[in-house]
Image (cartoon, rainbow, N blue to C red):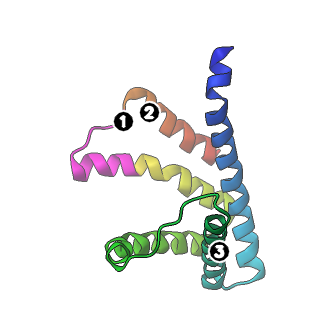
Amino acid sequence: MAWCQRDAPNVFAILGYATCSSLMLVVNKLAVHLLPAPSFVLLMQFFTSCFAVKLCGICGCIVVDQLEWRKLRAFLPISAAFLACVFANIKALQFGNVETFIVFRASTPLFISLADFCFLGRELPGVRSAVCLVALLAASVG
């Protein structure tokens, strides 16, 4: 029973993340369906996130670093790549259905691990990991 108490925060975090992720997927699909302007939807989500971080910083819940040009310039390519991925996701939601999006999202780790092996010379996933990746894809497909 000690393992239950020890792992409870992790289980809670995993369940919370899964719940938020699935709800945001449905909410984003609904948003781009009702308001066919995915760029505006993303802009509002990013502004809301920025506002929430600033508010939490003002309230003292978190420590928010000041923007520094050196750091901003260093992270700009990463931010641009992240924005491109998020924009591609919301465009896929705009023109496809949620089920198709889930299948593509579930297949991504499998193909990334194969691309890592082919192009970066990394090891293939172990048997347990490979079985989990294939099971994830199979569960999402059917």
Secondary structure predominantly adopted by residues drawn in magenta: helix
Residue that numbered label 1 is attached to: 125
Percent across and percent down for residue 136 are 56, 41
- Closer to the chain start, of discs 1 and 3, is 3
Can the viewer see residue 96?
no
Image point 52% across, 73% down: which residue? Answer: 88
Percent across and percent down for residue 116 are 30, 49
- Closer to the chain start, of discs 2 and 3, is 3
Can the viewer see residue 142?
yes
- Residues under labels 2 and 1: Cα distance? 6 Å
Q: Which residues are magenta?
A: 112-125
Q: Amino acid at mark 3?
A: Phe
Of the two numbered discs 1 and 3 in the rendering, the one whose residue sits closer to the viewer: 3
Q: Is residue 139 magenta?
A: no
Image point 69% across, 54% down: which residue? Answer: 20
Residue that numbered label 3 is attached to: 51
Q: Callout 1: 10 Å neighbours few (<14), some, many (20+)? A: some
Residue that numbered label 2 is attached to: 129
- Residues under labels 1 and 3: Cα distance? 40 Å
Percent across and percent down for residue 135 are 55, 36
